[in-house]
Each structure stands twice: as C-alpha cells, then as structure tokens.
Image (spheres, grey):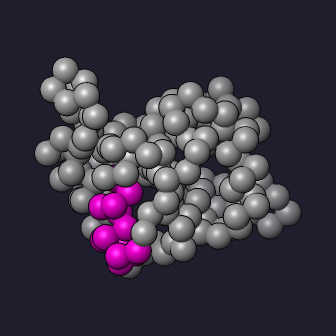
Amino acid sequence: MKLYIVQHGDALTKDIDAERPLSNIGHAEVGQVAALLAGHMHVSRVVHSGKLRAQQTADIFTAIIAGEFPVEQVEGIDPNDSVVDFAQKIEEWGEDMLVVSHLPFVDRLVSLLLSGRETENIVSYTPGSICCLESKSGGGWQLQWMIKPELL
C-alpha cells in the first residue's frame, strides 16, 4: 500500500479571503507537482479535510493524476487532529490513497508512521509538498520520496 500525504497548496490569507482558497501561486505549484507525477502515481482513494484549500488541492491532483472521480471529505485530518486515530483508519482502508491536509497534521502523521513518534519532525513540508510512504511487509512504513514545489 502506498500513502501519498500532501500539504495543501499556498493559500490566501484570512484578511484577503476568510475561506482561504488557494492563491494563484498555490494553483500553479500544485498543478506542477501533480503533472510531474502523472503516470507515476495511482490511487484508488483521495481524501481531504474539507477546508477549501485542501479540497482544491485534492481536486487538482485528482484531475491530473487520477482522472475525474469524486474526492472525499473525511473527519479527523484537520491541523490539530489526532494522527494516531487517523493512522488506525489508514490501516483499515488498505488501499493506495492520497491524503490532503494541513500543518502540523501532515508532519506529525509522517513522523508517527515512520518512527512511531509524532514529534520527530522527520520531514519538512512547505505548501504543495507531497511525501510517498509505502507499507512494509511485516508492518511499518518506509519513505519512498518527497517532492516540494520549489524544487521544480
């Protein structure tokens, strides 16, 4: 099973738009990352937190890498939600999936899955970044790669 964990793209500030949609830069960067991964990434499920910027990021990835199919809003992946609870759900789902959320959730989730401790700060996310983790036979997870928009 592969798990793709994405921090939403760059968003407008609250003083510009209270709903915090993706900025023009956010749209462009997420599109570039998704285009790079087109044909190399296959998922059967795309989930997001329900916040507009996460939904827009999920929609861009879905349109480019997976074709048009519905993305799902799921509970429990807001910025300060429990990564332990969500990690248990991932194990139950057992399918390649893309998760779009926020800091500090994405950072803590990767740390928990790779080290068993959510406070390790193993990776450094920036808006629009994606990590690919793969479950190991016998249990646990392994980091396969990470892409940040500023590398493109």
Q: Residue at x 73, y 32 (%)?
A: 117
Q: Is residue 47 left or right of residue 76?
A: left
Q: Residue at x 31, y 52 (%)?
A: 56
Q: Residue at x 59, y 69 (%)?
A: 96
Q: Residue at x 51, y 72 (%)?
A: 43
Vertical comparison of 52 with 15: above or below: below
In the foreground, 111 or 97: 97
Q: Is residue 125 visible?
A: yes
Residue 143 percent coordinates (x, y): 60, 53
Vertical comparison of 38 with 18: above or below: below
Q: Is residue 36 visible?
A: no
Q: Is residue 118 left or right of residue 64?
A: right
* Quarter in which the N terminus is drawn: bottom right
In the foreground, 58 or 146: 58
Magenta-tinted stretch: 57-69
Residue 72 drawn in magenta: no
Magenta-drawn stretch, dominant element (helix, strand or loop)? helix
Q: Is residue 66 left or right of residue 3?
A: left
Vertical comparison of 62 with 19: above or below: below
Q: Is residue 11 left or right of residue 112?
A: left
In the rendered image, the residue lying farthest to the top is 15
Residue 139 percent coordinates (x, y): 82, 58
Q: How many marks?
A: 0
In the foreground, 45 or 123: 45
Residue 134 percent coordinates (x, y): 64, 62
Residue 102 percent coordinates (x, y): 45, 37
